[in-house]
Image: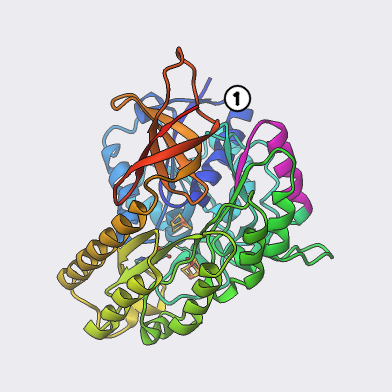
Amino acid sequence: MKKFYIETFGCQMNVHDSEKVVGTLLARGYEQVPAPEQADLVFYNTCSIRDKAEQKVFSRLQDFRKNSKGKTFAVLGCVAQQEGERIFERAPHVSLVCGSASYNQLPRLLVQIENGDKRVTGLSLDTEETFETPLTRRDNPHRAYITIIEGCDKSCSYCVVPFTRGPERSRTTGGILAESRQLAGAGYTEIQLLGQNVNSYRDPSDDQIDFARLLRKVAEVPGLKRVRFTTSHPRDFTRDIVDAIGENPVLCNHVHLPVQSGSTSVLASMQRLYTRGEYMERIEWMKNARRDIAISTDIIVGFPGETEQDFEQTLTLLDQVEYDSIFSFKYSPRPNTPALQYADQIPGEEKSRRLTILQEKQRSIQMRRNAAFIGRIEEVMVEGCNKATSQWIGRTSQNKTLNFTAPQRASESLIGQYLPVRVLRAGPNSLVGESFN
Ligand code: SAH
Ligand code: SF4
Ligand code: F3S
């Protein structure tokens, strides 16, 4: 039996794509192994969002340059789409290069590889149906990802995603609901709806169902306790979404709304299609909602032309919004993107300085926000167990990590259960508590 190894980089979309690829391989009789050394076929599902991410796959491939005998190497995902056949030049021992928009071609490409072909590619960015993948092999038995929209039709001036994942294609609401019901039937209680811009979801069938209505429908699927979604684009984020969350406790009270910068002029040169004021309007909808909605974001520092004043605006935005968490990055120039050609690129040292200042500020905001949870009782879904600290690892609806102790009950696993936990302590990145029943 042929053995394969797969390593995944990048976002949840990639993680879920790998689950689809693993399902396809298992159905073809391959066996998954935990280390590349044991494998005949080595897959890297890659990310090219920043230069560092892209370099990872080439350094992995470099490890095997001299010792690749008997192995077949395959590069999937965003670096595959971006670099295409150039990958064969950079890493001659690679045999298969396939982007995410062509995964429906994978079975055919695998046959070619099995027949001894040395170089095969799936690089078309056509919009054929790629959603209905009944072979998906999910890693987690309780929480499942579901793709609702592929690709991205925005053109943020720094971003490779429109090139690596192609134009937007929404999946039918019928298909999404059928998969949700099937997953609930199989015991999944949490579903995460995925897309680069879920807010621009529109049912391609006659119903024209939009994202807020889709959310309400998925939340009604019997058996589901939590529904999350990512990622939202502020331009397409509507008040209906906030209303839906306010009305239905199955919809998690957490929204990830990437802002990128607090400066309207930087937002304009990023081509984000909203001003700081328009972004804040959306934040106000959430702050005034019926439920306490946790808000997180993505921020890029050191975008070309970002002045000290622009950066200050991002800092004041952090104070104004008081995010529950942020992902922050130094701007990384990317191939094919307009910002690559922009004047006033910011030196690396300056980007690092700004990133540190930003992260320190956010750390103190998170300390303060999390401290407000001390004494509260929060429901967690138990995700794991930390043997070293004898604590269970839980997650709240707001997506906060809550580590907790539970009364000893002989070797019972709590993983997958929903429990009330009293919060006793708080740090910047997590809460600590105890379960009392
Ligand atoms: N579709 C999502 C997320 C895309 S990628 C969205 O629009 O929000 C995730 C994050 O990576 C982005 O939100 C952005 O903050 C960051 N990112 C994208 N391109 C980048 C680049 N060239 N340099 C640094 N960070 C980048
Ligand atoms: Fe990239 Fe912008 Fe699309 Fe997000 S919305 S994937 S940042 S182009
Ligand atoms: Fe990376 Fe592609 Fe996702 S570039 S962040 S893996 S869409």
Determine whether, in the image, residue 160 is placed left or right of residue 187. left
In this rendering, the count of numbered labels is 1
Q: Amino acid at mark 1?
A: Gly
Q: Is mark 1 within 8 Å of ligand 3?
A: no
Tell me if residue 189 can be seen: yes
Q: Main secondary structure of the magenta part?
A: helix
- Of residue 69 and residue 18, the one placed in the foreground of this image is 18
Q: Which residues are magenta?
A: 174-192
Determine whether, in the image, residue 27 is placed left or right of residue 369. right
- Of residue 128 and residue 275, the one placed in the foreground of this image is 275
- The picture places residue 326, in percent across and down from the top left corner, at 37, 60
- The picture places residue 428, in percent across and down from the top left corner, at 29, 52
- The picture places residue 357, in percent across and down from the top left corner, at 20, 67
**What crowding class fits label 1: few (fewer than 14 Cα within 10 Å), some (14-19), or many (20 or more)?**
few
Q: Which residue is mark 1?
A: 29
Q: Quadrant of residue 286?
A: bottom right
Is residue 239 rendered magenta in the image?
A: no
The residue lying furthest to the right in this view is 206
* Residue 178 drawn above or below residue 358: above
* Residue 399 drawn above or below residue 352: above
The image quadrant where one finds ligand 1 is bottom left
Dot 1: element: loop
